[in-house]
Image: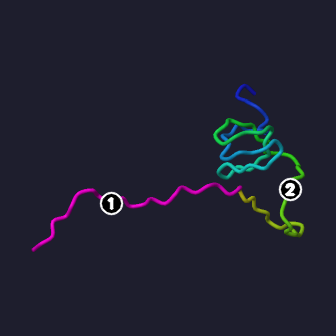
Amino acid sequence: MQNFVHRGETLTLTAPYAVNSGGGVKVGNIFGVAASTHIQGDSMEAQVEGVFDLAKDASVFAQGDLVYWMTPPRPRPAPSVPTCSSARRSRPN
């Protein structure tokens, strides 16, 4: 087959946040495991097929339960603060 590119077990993605090697990463609707450590904005390889042992919270899952990945908390932009104008308003007499 002449149009075969690669098996698709790993994808090159842009790290949406800092991620350690072996850590879970979610980019849009794609979930994978980072092949190496990266900072936000790096081009990275993520393994998207396979079985991995990942850390989790104390939740208990039954076989067949849906499991969701929570991305790490990210700093939120500061709310915009209205600025005062230096122009003076004239008051009616």
Which residue is depicted at the point 67% across and 37% down?
A: 42
Q: Residue 55 carries which label?
A: 2
Asked whether 87 or 63 is in front, the reply is: 87
Give the mark nearer the N terminus: 2 vs 1: 2
**Which quadrant is the N terminus positioned in?**
top right
Q: Which mark is residue 11?
A: none
Circle 1 is placed at which residue position? 84
Please tell me whether the stretch drawn in magenta is mainly helix, strand or loop: loop
Which residue is depicted at the point 64% across and 55% down?
A: 74
**Which quadrant is the C terminus positioned in?**
bottom left
Work out whether 75 lies above or below 3.
below
Look at the image and give the residue range highlighted in magenta.
72-93
Work out whether 73 lies above or below 19.
below
Taking 82 as reference, is 55 left or right?
right
Q: Residues within 10 Å of mark 2 (few under 14, many from 20)?
A: few
Q: How crowded is mark 1: few (under 14 residues within 10 Å), some or many (20 or more)?
A: few
Going by the numbered disc 1, the residue's amino acid type is Cys
Which residue is depicted at the point 79% across and 65% down?
A: 66
Mark 2–mark 1 distance (CA, rounded to whole Å): 49 Å
- Residue 29: x, y in percent? 67, 52
Residue lying at the far left in this picture: please name it: 93
Going by the numbered disc 2, the residue's amino acid type is Ala
Element at badge 2?
loop
Asked whether 38 or 27 is in front, the reply is: 38
Element at badge 1?
loop
Is 87 covered by the magenta stretch?
yes
Q: Nearer the viewer, mark 2 or mark 1?
A: 1
Which quadrant of the structure image shows residue 39? top right
Residue lying at the far bottom in this picture: please name it: 93
Asked whether 52 or 4 is in front, the reply is: 52
